[in-house]
Amino acid sequence: MTRRLLPGPGRRSRQGALIVGVVALVGAGGWLAGSRMQSPADAAAGHRPPDTRPVTVAVQRQRLTASVVAQGSVEFGAARSVSLSGPVGATGGSEGEAAAQLVTRLPEAGATLAEGSVLMQVSGRPVFVLRGTVPMYRTLGPGVSGDDVRQLQSALRRLGHDPGGVGGHYGQGTAAAVTQWYKSKGFEPQSPDADDEQQLGDLQQAVTDAQLALLQVRSGEGGGADSGGKGGEASSAAPASGAAHTLELKSAHRRLDRANMALSSFTSGYGTKLPAGEVVFLPDLPARVDKAKVRLGDTPDGPVVTVTSSDVLVRAVVPGSDSQHVRKGMTVRIDTADGGHVTGVVTEIAGSAAKPGDGKKADGEGGEARADGADGDSDAEGAGSGDPSTPVPVLVSVPRPGALRDQSGSAVTVTIGVSSSKGPVLVVPVAAVHTTSDGEAHVRVERGGKVVGVPVEAGLSAAGQVEVTPRRGALRAGDQVVVGQ
């Protein structure tokens, strides 16, 4: 008889746990499969595009300014080359011959030249700077007359050395003033040299000799008259003796006249002179030394220096299309590479030409810009070229250089405010303005979940923004205008 053993309590417990685990695993798999399965309706709903809403931006109220931005370079104005008009004063060599004219002190770059300043030295002699428009073209000295002398006399008077008059004739008063001026600067004036003094002495001696000869003739004439009264013989010879004395007297007078004329002619030009190479006249002072064009030891037979005015300028180039909006007198912002900025004024536009109505156009298009910096002339000029591919040079003056004073040759950014709104206006992005088929501009405004059209009049446009004025309906700052979908 076979005996069947029943499982014990431990074995039954293990079987129950196994069954529970299998059931849990099957349930989890069913849940996972159910979560990944979709009905056809659910699948279609999942592939529909999301609901779209228009892209909007807020209407703003602000002042709008249109600008032209260009790159420029800093420079000083009125650059000009300077040459000497002749040699400096006579400088003797070891045996009296004229020494070589050599540069012994250079112009100092960046130096400011006031009236009476020493620009440089040649062979130890000064080259002065004076204000005047007539160039120095000859040596000035006693006896010389002309506009150049009058110009010199005016300069001497401004320097505090009175020439005694400003009549244009170089006399002894002018010579004395030149002497004082040179000595006040620590230089010896160009006084008469040894040859001049010797010639003066010779001429003075010739006058003295002529005077003595005349006295001798007169003395002989007096003796003849006395002897003529002593006897008949002497008396009979008197007529012949009197004729000889008359001839001798006339000859002596002529000799003295010639000697006096020679002395007078020489002394009229005798005295302190101003050599042609020792003065440079410049029309505007003070001036600035830009660059020396000679080296020490050079012979100054060409340009010796470049000078400029002390005015700071910025030279920029704008596209031809933008130049149509630029006018003389417009205010300019100039930004340096290191973050500094100054204000300038447009003073010149290459190719500019006055056209009928330019003045009114400038007032209408850039009223506020004109108020900020324009000169207000009715003949305001703009660039004459309208070709957008042709760049137009623009010159900007900087009355107060500030950060640009030592920036000659550096690059700067030039911003010209060509037009401005009259105070704060409603402004929207250009993309918000649409034109209907009938040519009317409008913007679309989102209100209460709906989009409505508002007709507007577009005005000034700048930097992607445009001024708008509602023609019908309401448009306020803060309204949301549609710029895209």
Image: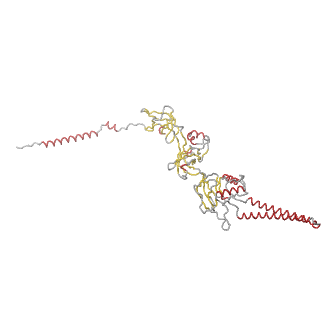
- Depth order, front residue of 448/34: 448
- Depth order, front residue of 338/71: 338
Indicate left or right for 80 with 249 as reference: left
Image location (x, y in percent) of residue 341: 52, 47
Is residue 396 visible in the rendered structure shown here? Answer: no
Image location (x, y in percent) of residue 204: 77, 63
**How many labels were placed on the picture?**
0
Quadrant of the rendered image containing residue 120: bottom right
Is residue 91 visible in the rendered structure shown here? Answer: yes
Q: Indicate the quadrant containing the C terminus: top left, top right, bottom left or bottom right.
A: top left
Image location (x, y in percent) of residue 312: 57, 50
- Depth order, front residue of 482/105: 105
Tell me if residue 379 comes above or below residue 183 in the rendering. above
Quadrant of the rendered image containing residue 9: top left
Tell me if residue 353 comes above or below residue 288 in the rendering. above
| Residue placed furthest toward the left | 1
Indicate left or right for 262 with 292 as reference: right
Indicate left or right for 340 with 163 as reference: left
| Residue placed furthest toward the right | 232
The residue under the point 9% across, 43% down is: 5
Tell me if residue 482 comes above or below residue 236 in the rendering. above
The residue under the point 53% across, 43% down is: 67
Image location (x, y in percent) of residue 293: 59, 59
- Depth order, front residue of 143/450: 143
Q: Indicate the quadrant containing the N terminus: top left, top right, bottom left or bottom right.
A: top left
Indicate left or right for 291 with 240 as reference: left
Quadrant of the rendered image containing residue 17: top left
Tell me if residue 323 comes above or below residue 472 in the rendering. below
Colour mapping used in the image: secondary structure
